[in-house]
Image (tube, rainbow, N blue to C red):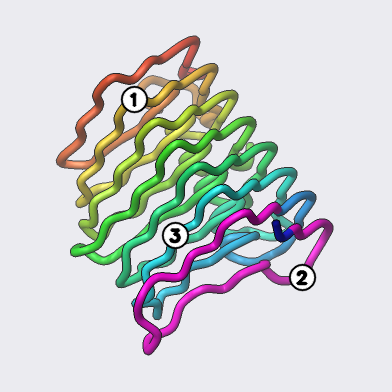
Amino acid sequence: TFTVVGAQTFRAFNLGSSTNTGTLILSGINIDGFISSQNGNAIECNSSSVLDVEINNCSFKNISSSGATVSGAININNVSANVTIKDSKFENIASGNNGGAISTNAKSTNTITIQNCTFKNTYTPTSSTVYNGGAIYANSTGYTLNIKDCTFEDTKASTGGAIYLSTLLTANISNCNFVRCTTQHPTAGTGHGGAINFMAPILNITGCKFDNCSDNG
């Protein structure tokens, strides 16, 4: 087990290279009480990466942003690789921008998988600016996003209280539980998506449960 505790001026891990290939595995890492001003306060898979990444059995707790960052814990930044995040916990995470816990973006031929993870009390800022995806924000370059066997509890954002799905991607959400996921849109109205807000052309939702999720409009 590797543990990182306390405020930092930079993220814990910056992964990726235009030359390194293969798979990098991060396992058994605990990050607690971490504060930074970087994209992906804990981990960034950067835009030059062609390295597949697997993050498993990790814990991210009490993470906050000291600047307008992309996501609270993990930022997957337009990578040319596959990323898997599984068997991990995200709790008490405050983003400075889109994606309370995770922000994803990948090339069109790649797949991002988030499996058997729990998201509790993760959120984007409350302000006059719209910030999306209380737990997960998925940006658009046409990749495939698989979210399965996950639990989202007490997550909130302007739109997509738990998950925000942008255009041009394929999203598969299966066997997930959404509990008290809410929106905090600065302009009350309909269509913000208490649990999920999507513009994805292909969206499959199977075997999911929604309990007490609501739109503030």
Kind of residue sitting beneath label 1: Asn
Judged from this view, the residue extending furthest toward the right is: 6
Rendered image quadrant of residue 194 = top left
Residue assigned mark 1: 175
Residue assigned mark 2: 9
Q: CA distance from mark 2 to mark 1?
A: 37 Å
- Tell me which label, 3 or 1, sits earlier in the chain: 3
Kind of residue sitting beneath label 2: Thr
Q: Nearer the viewer, residue 102 or 187?
A: 102
Q: Residue at x 32, y 63 (%)?
A: 82
Judged from this view, the residue extending furthest toward the front is: 1
Query: Magenta stretch: residue 12 in it?
Result: yes
Rendered image quadrant of residue 41 = bottom right
Q: Nearer the viewer, mark 3 or mark 2?
A: 3
Read off the magenta span: 3-30
Q: Nearer the viewer, mark 2 or mark 1?
A: 1
Whether residue 110 is situated above or below residue 87 in the rendered picture: below
Q: Is residue 139 left or right of residue 9?
A: left
SS assignment at label 1: loop
Residue 157 at x, y = what percent? 53, 34
Q: Is residue 130 visible?
A: no
Query: Magenta stretch: residue 190 in it?
Result: no
At label 3, counting other C-alpha atoms closer than 10 Å, the crowd grade (few under 14, some 14-19, many 20 or more) is: some
Judged from this view, the residue extending furthest toward the left is: 201
